[in-house]
Image (cartoon, rainbow, N blue to C red):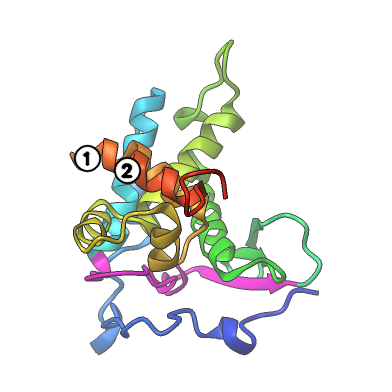
Amino acid sequence: MAKKCKERRCDMSQAVPPLKSSREGNDPPRVTLAKLRAIAAVGVTPVERSLHLARRQAEMLLDAHPVDTGMIPAEVITELRGIRVEWVPGQRLPSAGFWDTAARQWVIQLAYADSWKQQRWALAREFKHILDYPHADDLYPSTDATSSRYLAEQAADHFADHLLVPDRLLRRAWSNDIGTAAELSVHFSVPEFVTERRLVDTPLGLDTGRARRHRAADVAGPDGGAA
């Protein structure tokens, strides 16, 4: 049976400075599912455009919840109207999502036993699938070489990576000499494979040679050999 917010997992901010709520003064949320989906309401979309869309949606969420450094709070997703998160003991998949007709909410279920880093990334990925739901066929048309599902998963990865490790904060961390994939994983509270990808694909003009040296340092021993 699914369990709602419980024990430490109920504190989604994990010691991050509290955000100013988008609902103070009974104001409507600055970002809604409808607004995030609206920019996807287009015709058949090439892969490059789909990835650009994923990144733009991540930026819209971040614009509504400015964070100066470090971990992006999960509230950028969980505080949106119409979203409910549950932690499910024994769930094998990292995440699952469905529409609760009775409650009129989208439900994101996370594997209770997974690490906090993995849960955060799975939450962001599943949210992207929810965003895509009305337009998935147009966004990810199958080709002879690539399936629609593969393209959708690729876009979900891209969205989660850029939401949880934004370009601006990655640049700031790098300038503060937080440069290895392992260090960035701790800094942003994401799985290490996410920061490895961001170091490779970031368009920030960083010293890619330095990035490669940092990544090599992650796996090298003190004498330069394999750890």
Q: Disc 2 marks which residue? A: 211
| Residue with the most extreme top position | 144
Q: What is the secondary structure assignment of the residue under circle 2?
A: helix
Which amino acid lies under the numbered mark 2 shown in the image of this protein?
Answer: Ala
Q: Position of residue 25 (x, y in %)?
A: 24, 88
Residue sitting nearer the eye, 96 or 193: 193
**What stretch of residues is rendered in magenta?**
64-88
Separation (CA) of disc 1 from disc 2: 6 Å
Q: Position of residue 206 (x, y in %)?
A: 21, 42
As displayed, is residue 121 above or below residue 135?
below
Q: What is the quadrant of residue 39 in the picture? A: top left
The quarter of the picture where the N terminus appears is bottom right
Asked whether disc 1 touches disc 2, contact meaning CB atoms under 8 Å apart, the reply is: yes
Q: What is the secondary structure assignment of the residue under circle 1?
A: loop
In the image, residue 85 lies in the stretch drawn in magenta? yes
Q: Is residue 111 left or right of residue 116?
A: right
Q: Is residue 39 visible?
A: no
Q: What is the quadrant of residue 49 in the picture? A: top left
Q: Position of residue 94 (x, y in %)?
A: 67, 57
Residue sitting nearer the eye, 176 or 20: 176
Q: Residues within 10 Å of mark 2 (few under 14, many from 20)?
A: some
Q: Residue at x 52, y 43 (%)?
A: 225
Q: Position of residue 63 (x, y in %)?
A: 23, 62
Q: Disc 1 marks which residue? A: 207
Which amino acid lies under the numbered mark 1 shown in the image of this protein?
Answer: Asp
